[in-house]
Image (spheres, helix red, strand yellow):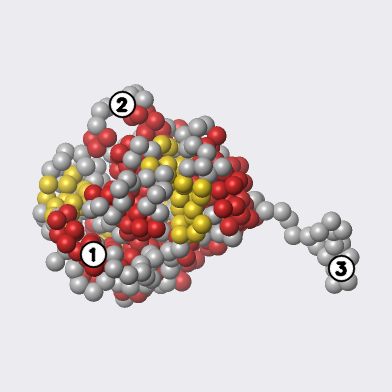
Amino acid sequence: MTPVEALVCERCGRRYAPDAVEYTCPDHGGVAGVLDVRYDYDALGDELDGALDGPTDDLWTYEPLLPVDGEPVRLGAGGTDLLSAPALGDALGVDALVKNETTNPTGSNKDRGSAVVVSRARQAGHDTVACASTGNAAASLAGYAARADLDCRIFVPADLPEAKAVQPRLYGATVLGVDGTYADAYELCREVSADRGWYNRNAAMNPYAVEGKRTLGFELAEGAPDADWVAMPMGNGCSLAGAWKGLREFERLGVVDDAPRMLGVQAEGATAIHDRFVAERDGVAADGGADSTDTAAGERGPGAERRDGVGDTTADSIDVSVPHNAGKACRALRESGGDAVAVSDGAIRDAQRLLGECEGVFAEPASAAAVAGVRAAVERGTIAPGERVVVVATGTGLKDSASAREAVDDVISVDAAGEGLPEDL
């Protein structure tokens, strides 16, 4: 049996038995009634000692704390390195650590969510899984579906970087390029999955997509119990919300005394969560209650209405105009005493190069946004000099080498005799 106690609607607070509803609260229709998975914390406490006994080989180290009943799908997600980052810290003016999620099986932190969702899909007898994605979730779901011998259908914006479109196809998934935004791909995936009976992984639609991401919070709590901040990029808001949920649970269970503050970072071309958080913090939100205003498909949050297409930022993984987990992300920022910042594409490119040069981590632009966000937060006084900050590198730069070219110098042409070799090298 899993430790799940209930599913609770983020909007109205209605509680459901774990098996009573598959996706969202039926009282609201569509994807408006985002559900949160709630646990029996007494039962979790009883299981905790065994889960924390020994090294964290992968996320299934925390299997007793996860909502999966039966043999899980194992591909090696989780248990990623937490790197001391002194050179990066010197450059930013903080005591820096890097949580290197680029080493997950398909190259991003999305593997944590897919591990749980695909395990539940197989457990429930589904033969096809689906999702909409800006790239990383697509590859992740496809890789885990292949491991579980399930069919996979992926809906992506048609202008997705080629490397991210190739990866899920290599895993055997069918990739459908949607002529429109991520929001269009999301809505089409929702409609088709419902019509054809596919198990939908989509963030916010599937309440369990965030649950595997709790394990990032578990690992941070164990590996950096004295961290002051955790900096993460935000697209849909699911990853930051999941990490905070895990941190908060381990604080509640006594693993850490104080959970760190969360810094959510968005690109200036896609600021819906940032804008909503700032509006709510400053008391100018359109209506009250963080849970009652969750942005759903077709409901644009503050700032999102000015975006009418895609390609507004080089950080395609967080180029989301309609973030379906905005409410959870804003609540995580608020509960943690954290903050949100927006950074330019130029700052992201500089940060991508800085992370590579300082620590040897090749992260995609969305990951580098977290580094740029820390720099911005230090400059404006949100993060104090010398504070301990964990930067989460959420995805590998190998998935978008075209963007990385903009951050580096040109190749120096030299002939076989060495002609053209600069004297000052």
Q: Position of residue 379 (x, y in %)?
A: 55, 34
Callout 1 touching callout 2 (CB < 8 Å)? no
Mark 2 secondary-structure assignment: loop
Foreground mark, 1 or 2, reads 1
* Among numbered discs 2 and 3, the one appearing first in the sequence: 2
Query: For the residue marked with disc 3, what is the amino acid?
Result: Gly
- Label 3 CA crowd tier, 10 Å (few <14, some 14–19, many 20+): few
Q: Residues within 10 Å of mark 2 (few under 14, many from 20)?
A: few
Residue 398: x and y in percent read: 55, 62
Q: Is residue 291 left or right of residue 114?
A: left
Q: As drawn, is 215 to the left or to the right of 421?
A: left
In terms of sequence position, does the residue under pointer 1 or pointer 2 come before the other?
1
Asked if disc 2 and disc 3 are in contact, CB closer than 8 Å, the reply is no
The quarter of the image holding the N terminus is: bottom left
Q: Position of residue 93 (x, y in %)?
A: 56, 42
- The residue labelled by disc 3 is 418
Residues tagged 1 and 3 counted as in contact (Cβ below 8 A): no
Taking the image as drawn, is residue 162 in sight? no
Q: Nearer the viewer, mark 2 or mark 3?
A: 3
Q: Secondary structure at mark 3?
A: loop
Few, some or many residues within 10 Å of mark 1 (<14, 14–19, 20+): few
Which quadrant of the view contains residue 290? top left
The residue type indicated by label 1 comes to Asp
- Identify the disc placed on residue 146: none
43 relative position to 395: left or right: left
Q: Nearer the viewer, residue 84 or 286?
A: 84
Q: Position of residue 79 (x, y in %)?
A: 39, 65
Give me the residue at 74% from left, 60% from top: 411
